Image (tube, coloured by chain):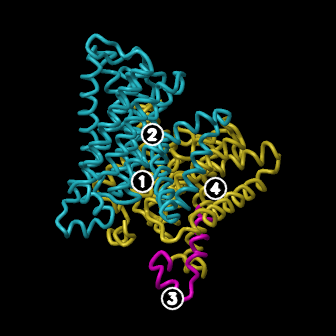
Amino acid sequence: MNLGDQLLQYLFTGITIGAIYGMVALGFNIIYSATGIINLAQGEFVMLGGMMMVYLTAIIKLPMVVSFFLSILIVTMIGAAFERAAIHPLKSPSVLTLIIITVAASILFKGGAMFAWGKHTFSLPPFSGEKPISVLEATILPQTLWILGIMGATVALLILFFGFTLTGKAMRACAANRTAASLVGINVRTMVLLSFALSAGIGAVAGIIITPIALMNYDRGTMLAVKGFSVAVLGGLGSNVGAVAAGFIIGIMESLGAGFISSGYKDAIALVVLLLVLFIKPSGLLGSRERAEFKKF
Amino acid sequence: MGKKNILSLLILAGVILALPLGLGNSYYLNVLVFVGIYSLITIGLSLLMGYTGQISLGHAAFFGLGAYTSGVLSAKFGVSPWLALLAAIFVTGGIAFLIGAPALKLKGHYLAMATLAFGYIVFIVFNQASSLTGGPSGFGQIPRFRLGNFLLRSDVHYYYLVWTLVIVVLLVSLNIIHSRVGRALRSIHEGELTANIMGVNTAKYKIQVFVLSAVYASLAGSLYAHFITFLNPTPFGFHFSIVLVAMVAVGGMASVWGAMIGAALLTILPEYLRAFHDYDILIYGSTLLVIMMFLPQGLFAGILSLIKKER
């Protein structure tokens, strides 16, 4: 394999993993837009999605398609339950309280997953065959196409939801101005609940489609959350286009870094990017400065 | 510093002196050494989080930097443990300054994630720089402290060393809290903008308290390294940063006494919950969640306010 082919191969790997990071970042954005909260338990939804899918297909032996939608449904409900149990009862919590509560929740989800499924690392068969497809001199796994396809479909559905449905528009209204939204009769608290459910669901989708390639165990959530957050910040918190683009950027950087520099320091790349963005331009590539200020950070 | 605090300090000193007489068993002393080491970190963290209102999800990294600097210098370069401890304080304090200066301009979630990312990067370096750190499997043969010709061998020796330092750190911290600086720190918590307008140099104070808390953590790390005499990266990961925050939150953020109580509770309780071994993570998570939801002031302040109501 010459350098060009290698580069192409790393590019494919980076795009695959970047799509997942992008989806985690979308989950961060949805809750952040509706509530101003950064849900540090976001990565656990991804983990739960993957684990639930493994459980339903391998142990309960449900068909693939049924398990797919059932896993998403279950994790969505977990997300909603989390909001009702831990976020909803709080009366004007401080940012510090919210951070610690979402961290505590992420520990509980992690612990719960360990309790339910143990410390094993689980795999999942790819959705359609394992025969790599040759593109030029590099290869793509069929699962990569599934990942890109499902991510595309998710983003398209999100655009339709936020752009053309009444509920979606109501959620956007909450993001823009909560007081004004409640004045025109939008139930802000319901929208908060919805945002948690929705981002849990998206996290679950990401977890399900990545598991056949990257495997899954109870401990994967935190790292995914940190990387997803790095992506969300690089793209500009609240900007969904930014999240998708930044996902690919960080995914590709990571896979090039692992290939050409050091695989041991691969995980540090996203974190260094996060620190640099936070220190130099906290509003990210596509986020607006006013928006960032507005959310009282 | 207030009569109450002086009285509390004296009582604490008395209890510390008396405890080893009551506890014949060195296992309990061993646990108490850890309570002391963790208290050093949580006292600093309470200054940072409770008084100044700045969160850190990466303090395990400063603990680790102290431990590794001390350990590597003394085990691989033959530096005396005391000098290594001092060097670790300068290294960790310097790194805290470099990371704190830009990070503390951030607020809330951004600061939390910046410190978290920093902690992760340090953890990855501990794992990867194996020529120095021995990688994931770590390294041993770190020398113990000496006082003149006297080698600190047993748990009792370390117990007295660690707790003497806890008293010193408490004295320093209480003095800071009850000074002009302490009032400045609290004013940052109440409202940074207002504090600024009143002429408080908030940026300077935030960095100072951040570096101070890192120095405390580094001190704790050095004590840990020269006590255990073996280091690997596991105790210095994200999980421990959260445990530290939990300790401070459980005890009561805005009180150094609360921070010590939290450290004691969350160190001793898991020892009794050995049966749950792997599931201590669930206990940490639920304690943290319940306390933040219902007693955001922490157990210490919660109990104090209950007592006041009774009167």
Give SS at disc 3.
Answer: helix
What residue would you read off at disc 2? A267
User: How far apart are the two marked residues, 1 and 2, measured between alpha carbons?
Assistant: 32 Å
User: How far apart are the two marked residues, 4 and 3, measured between alpha carbons?
Assistant: 34 Å
Which residue type carries mark 3? Answer: Leu
Q: Residue at x 25, y 48 (%)?
A: B175
Have a look at marks 1 and 2 and say if they share a chain.
Answer: no
Residue A182, magenta (yes or no): yes
Graded by Cα atoms within 10 Å as few (under 14), some (14 to 19) or many (20 or more), the crowding at tag 1 reads many
User: In this view of the protein, which residue sits in the foreground, B227 or B251?
Assistant: B251
Give SS at disc 4.
Answer: helix
User: How far apart are the two marked residues, 4 and 2, measured between alpha carbons?
Assistant: 22 Å
Q: Nearer the viewer, mark 4 or mark 3?
A: 3
Which residue type carries mark 4? Answer: Val
C-beta proximity under 8 Å, tags 4 and 3: no
Residue B90 image offset from top left, x and y in percent? 23, 33
What residue would you read off at disc 3? A183
C-beta proximity under 8 Å, tags 4 and 2: no
User: In this view of the protein, which residue sits in the foreground, A296 or A28?
Assistant: A296
